[in-house]
Image: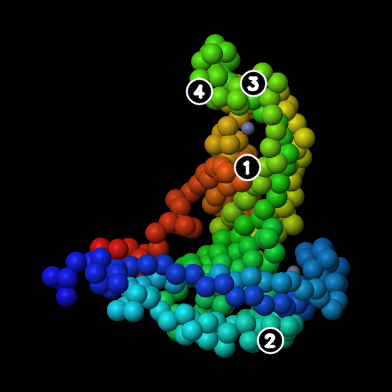
Amino acid sequence: MTDVPLSERHGQGRGCVITRRACFCASHRYWLPELSSDENAACFGLCALSPGHGHNYELIVSMAGELNADGMVLNLSEVKHAIRSEVTEQLDFRFLNDVWPEFDLSNSEGCLPTTEALARIIWDRLIPHLPLVAIRLYEHQGLWADYLGDAMDAYLTIRTHFAAAHRLARAELSKEENERIYGKCARPHGHGHNYLLDVTVRGEVNPRTGMVCDLVALQNLVNDLVVEPFDHTFLNKDVSHFASCVPTAENIALHISDCLVTPIREIGAHLHKVRLQESPNNAAEVYAEAPKLESMPEALQAVAAN
Ligand SMILES: [Zn+2]
Ligand SMILES: [Zn+2]
């Protein structure tokens, strides 16, 4: 085999990550029997209302392996079958609290069917069948969880947006130098963007609440520390940090990360990543800790040497 050039072997033996998407609709309710009605309402807000509410979930299954002689990591029909029989057929149109024993709250081992708990349990159910490297589960386009097979560690991302104006120019440079560096973005009266902001936190899934942190507390932090002070402002003038720091997408993402890292630790999670999308054509990502998401999975590193 080794005397045949790689390019003539359908990539056989070389590593690749493949993904498969699947959707299901399901309902759930956040309600712990050991808490009173008032305590459940205080902890879980509208999610505690009877009889529950539903989501259109979107599941992205990432798998890695070496290509076979047919040029595939796995036959997609086998992947589809495993995801359907182990996950979507069991969950679709069901009440999650009732469907899997992991969510049986009458049992002290049971946990609430949150997005991050569901991602972790979907991993457990698929790993005997598929060479998983990551599970991503969208509850909706503004909230998703990632699980990479790392014990109880999971990632939760919330997406929000704000609109703001800025001007890219450094005060110590001439008009010509600023125009050379920043182009149209240096024009004196600024211009604006509708920014999309993704904040990803990492933490241990609580074995009872199924949460890496209090979601409402996280949403409030992002809203109070970023969205409210930034939305409908001229960043250079209205946000004091940008009086002396050019508000490029990179600098805005870094500043958001710096604003959030300690408050997120205080609600029991770790800020992992901030992603700021300025336009459909550009985005900046800042990691507040060693990157794991979207980095090369260990399973792929093993086959990358081939
Ligand atoms: Zn929900
Ligand atoms: Zn701009």
Of 71 and 248, nearer the camera is: 71
Give the number of the disc on residue 181.
4
Whether label 4 touches label 3, CB < 8 Å: no
Give the number of the disc on residue 187.
3
Distance Cα–Cα, label 4 vs label 3: 12 Å
Which corner quadrant of the image does residue 71 belong to? bottom left
Q: How crowded is mark 4: few (under 14 residues within 10 Å), some or many (20 or more)?
A: few
Q: What secondary structure is found at the residue carrying circle 3?
A: loop
Distance Cα–Cα, label 4 vs label 2: 58 Å
Look at mark 2 in the image and give the residue it sits on: 99
First of labels 4, 3 by sequence position: 4
Residue type marked 4: Ile
Ligand 2 shows up in the quarter that is top right
273 relative to 25, above or below = above
Q: What secondary structure is found at the residue carrying circle 2?
A: helix
Q: Is residue 101 visible?
A: no
Distance Cα–Cα, label 3 vs label 2: 58 Å
Of 207 and 304, nearer the camera is: 304
Which corner quadrant of the image does residue 251 belong to? top right
The quadrant of the rendering that contains the N terminus is bottom left
Q: Can residue 147 be seen in this view?
A: yes
280 relative to 101, above or below = above
Look at mark 1 in the image and give the residue it sits on: 279
**Label 1 CB sits under 8 Å from any ligand 2 atom:** yes
Distance Cα–Cα, label 4 vs label 1: 19 Å
Residue at image position (82%, 64%) is: 45
Q: What secondary structure is found at the residue carrying circle 1?
A: strand
Whether label 3 touches label 1, CB < 8 Å: no
Q: How crowded is mark 1: few (under 14 residues within 10 Å), some or many (20 or more)?
A: few
First of labels 3, 2 by sequence position: 2
Foreground mark, 4 or 2, reads 4
